[in-house]
Image (cartoon, grey):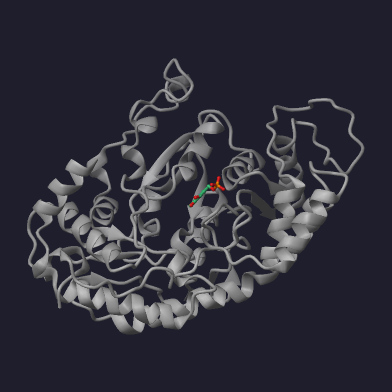
Amino acid sequence: MKLALNGGAAVIPPGLIKKWPPVDETDEKMVLDSLRGKNHAFGPNCVAFQEEFAAWNGNRFAVFTNSGTAALHMGLCACGVGAGDHVITTAYSWSSSATCILHHNAIPIFVDIDFDTINIDIDKIEAAITPRTKAIVAVHLHGLALNMEKLLAIAKKHKLKVIEDACQSHGAQFKGRKVGQFGNCAAFSFNQNKSLCAGEGGMFVTDDEDIYRKALQLWSFGETRTPTESRDYHAYALGWMYRGSDLVAAFGRAQLAKLTRNLEAEMTNAAVLNRRLGNLKGLITPTAPQGHTHTYYNYTSRIDMKALGWSEDPKLMRDAIIKALQAEGTMVGMWQSFILPHMTVFQARNAYGNGCPWSCNGAGDGVVYDVNGYPAAVRHCETHFGMTVPLRAPNGPDVAEKVADAFEKVFGNVGQLDPHAIAAAAKEAR
Ligand SMILES: Cc1ncc(COP(=O)(O)O)c(C=O)c1O
């Protein structure tokens, strides 16, 4: 069977995969009602969204923010992390899982991932703890919760605070509990691609009133009062402007009402791929260890180069396979291609100028960002690719079956690919 990349017919016809998120009359009505309302800043939809999200996720408090990054930064502040403190996080995630630490003048300490789960290798955390360590930014990546029993045991032993980065993992569970219920606080994102899309936006959640109050300080100009309380326009502390707006909250509320259903679709569609592709030669499909409910926010696979008989640069083969799958109409792509410690913001060790925060009071002494120190994350980066939209509502199992057909076609005909020629053509096209 000729691959579409080589001129054959594509498996998936254009238009079969529907865009994300599905928008209906409820979304339209709620956004229009907000538009016609009186308060476009932190208005009634924002207050309602906080209450509804807290109820959905099982938290006492929720604060609506203008991004997941803002919610993460609030977490650092609320947990009392101070200048020069060390905060542990994973070597592979979105940049702001680590830059939120820098934003609080603290030092990110990276720990390699566990290759199978793509999440931080919990067994390597203790070795990274220093006398300065104050917290862990615990990232639940791609819709898979961390083993929070193990992580919290380490945090308790070393008296560390835990900020859950649940930006990618709405509804993911560990032993029947949703992420966001384990740590001292947690951050969710509602950006375009997330399982709850409001365009942009985020939510800070916690069950601890003290942490909630401290987070509010950073959220709104250091005023330490919510905009629903009477304001005295006094900056009691150093704050930012992290509040969300009413239009975004209106869209978010409409999508929240469908979140459980949309997550079920995501999981049902992923189950089709797991069944069809689990034994496909050359492909490593996502893992969900026992006790973890994976939402498959991003269906991330890796290529088993050995199984394909490829011993050259793995990125060449990975990129060729992505191109071939895209030509079949699958909408696969590549998320983060760098491990976090490799990123210039960390390598340059100069976030605030004058070498700060690393140079301040010896905070960065002994901290090394050796790009070869995270072999599992590097291996992941060189071999992974992922997919979101085809598995999301309104796409159903029929689409997932088609996607599986395309994967089978490409992996069954890898011999038709010339990775060097494909890379050269891509370079020329640039
Ligand atoms: C793991 C992770 N953390 C944090 C963020 C930041 O969220 P936002 O884009 O809403 O600031 C993202 C967003 O992509 C993410 O994937």
- The answer to whether residue 249 shows anywhere in this view is yes
Q: In this view, does 279 lie to the left or right of 313?
A: right
Q: In this view, does 33 lie to the left or right of 377?
A: right
Residue 200 percent location from the top left of the image? 61, 48
From the viewer's side, name the closer residue of 100 and 192. 192
Residue 259 percent location from the top left of the image? 63, 69
Q: Which residue lies furthest to the right in this view?
A: 230
Q: Residue furthest top?
A: 354
Residue 255 percent location from the top left of the image? 66, 64
Q: In this view, does 338 lie to the left or right of 32?
A: left
- When the figure is inspected, residue 57 is found, relative to residue 242, above or below; the finding is below
Which image quadrant: the N terminus? bottom left
| Image point (32%, 78%), residue name | 404
Using the rendered view, name the quadrant where residue 229 is placed. Answer: top right
- When the figure is inspected, residue 45 is found, relative to residue 181, above or below; the finding is above
| Image point (44%, 38%), residue name | 108
From the viewer's side, name the closer residue of 97 and 123. 97
| Image point (44%, 47%), residue name | 94
Using the rendered view, name the quadrant where residue 195 is placed. Answer: bottom right
